[in-house]
Structures are given as C-alpha cells and as structure tokens.
Amino acid sequence: MSLSAEYCSEKTGDRGGGGGALAHQRRLIRGLLVWATLLTLGLAASITLHFIHRESPAPDKPQDPGKHAQPTPTPKVTELMSFSPNWSGKDPVELLEWKTEKNDFIEINSTDKQLKVKYDGQYFLYVQLTLEPHMKGNYTITMQSNIFGVILKGLTNGSTHSTFFMGKGFKLSRGDLLNVTCKPKAKIQINHTLTHLGVIRLR
C-alpha cells in the first residue's frame, strides 16, 4: 500500500515543496553554533581574567596579613672601630697599646690600656702588624681575652714576611678585656696604615 505525496506533505509539515523543514533545522543549527561560540569566548575570557588576577593582584585590594605573610628579615647593622698604635716605635714592645677616636662599643681601660668590651654580641676581630725591616727571627702574635683565653694566634718571620695579618669572628661578653702581644719583644712600625687593629660589631 503506498501513501500519496499530499499525505506525506501534510504529516511532515512540508507544504511548500519539501524544503521548509530542512531550512528550519538549518536556522536552529546556526543559532546553536552562535550560542556555542559566544559561550566559548566568554569562558576563555573568564579563565584569562582569573589567571591575570592571580598573578598580579589589584593594588587597591588590601591583602589579609594573616595569609601568606612572610616575616621581614631584620637587616644586620655593622659598626666598626679602628685602633692605631699608641707606643713608641723606638723600643721593642711586647704588650701593644692602642688608641682610637671613639669608644662606641669598646673602650680603652685607663689602668692597663687593655680593650674593654661594653656589650655582649658577635664581633669580627682583626689585627695587622708590620715589623721594622731589621727585625729577624720568629715572633708569635697573640690576641687574648680575659674570659675566653687566646682568640687569635699566629707566627711571623721577620726575615721573609715583615707584615702579618689575622682575623676571626667571635662572640664576646660585656666586661671582657682584650690585649695583643708580640713575643719575643719586637720593634713594630707605628704607621697606622702598616699596623692597626679593628673590631666590627654585628647586631
């Protein structure tokens, strides 16, 4: 049994020659494609803005100090004191006496001319000695603390090396007394560029 063309046309809604339903479907597909494109573009823009916002937060938005707060490290402040020779360069010396223009954290003891530490803390100590050119033989240079004993010690041979340098970081206590000795006695140049002592305070 066969159906007539008019019957099929009435059932499918194609009353204008068979192309109406197909055109309607095409319009719906085009509309869906437009919406899908708009949604895709909107989603891409939203994701892009999200990552930009995470990488560079707005400057006018205050950050919660309780979240991701990194402690700011306290910068170390250094202070330096320089000491120059305070003895006559004519005679051999064993206990070296020093002078300085300021007494910030180390002062010169008036009775025995030793260096007195005023504050507990970490220090870097260094000393340079230059023997007179005619001084021959071996000499032991020592920096000593009344509390901790020998802090620095070195040997120099006047016949090969007349200038001697040594340094070390050390923790010192308030009231400690420091002295520098040269054994046996030697004639040491008193020019402050050749012979000097320095103390750096770290805090």
Image (tube, grey):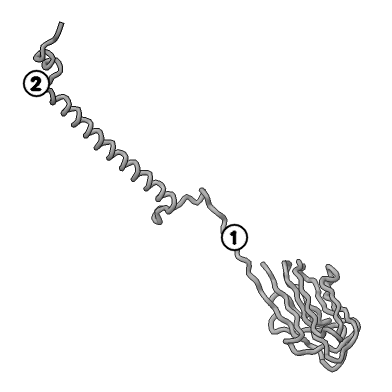
**Mark 1 element type:** loop
Identify the residue at image location x=39%, y=46%: 50
Nearer the observer: mark 1 or 2; the answer is 2
The x, y position of residue 14, in whole percent, is: 12, 21
Return the residue at label 2.
15
Question: Residue 127 is drawn in which quadrant?
Answer: bottom right
**Which picture quadrant has residue 59?**
bottom left
Q: What residue type is labelled 1?
A: Pro
Q: In which quarter of the image is residue 114?
A: bottom right
Q: Do the residues labelled 1 and 2 touch (CB within 8 Å)?
A: no
In the depicted view, which residue is nearer to us: 187 or 16? 16
Q: Residue reaching furthest top? A: 1
- Identify whether 181 is placed above or below 38: below
- Tell me residue 146's x, y (percent): 84, 71
The one of 47 and 54 positioned closer to us in this rendering: 47
Mark 1 Cα within 10 Å, few/some/many (few <14, many 20+)? few
- In the rendered image, the quadrant that contains the N terminus is top left
Give the residue at x 66% y 74%: 79
Q: Which amino acid does label 2 sit on?
A: Arg
Dot 2 alpha-carbon crowd within 10 angstroms: few under 14, some 14 to 19, many 20 or more: some
Position of residue 188 measured from the top left corner of the image (x, y, whole percent): 82, 88
Q: Which residue is painted at 84% across and 84% down in the image?
A: 160
**Mark 1 or mark 2, earlier in chain:** 2
Mark-to-mark CA distance, 1 and 2: 84 Å
Q: Is residue 58 left or right of residue 89?
A: left
Name the residue tied to disc 1.
73
**Of helix, strand and loop, which one carries label 2?**
loop
Across and down, in percent, residue 203 comes to: 66, 67
Task: Name the residue: 81% across, 74% down.
Answer: 177
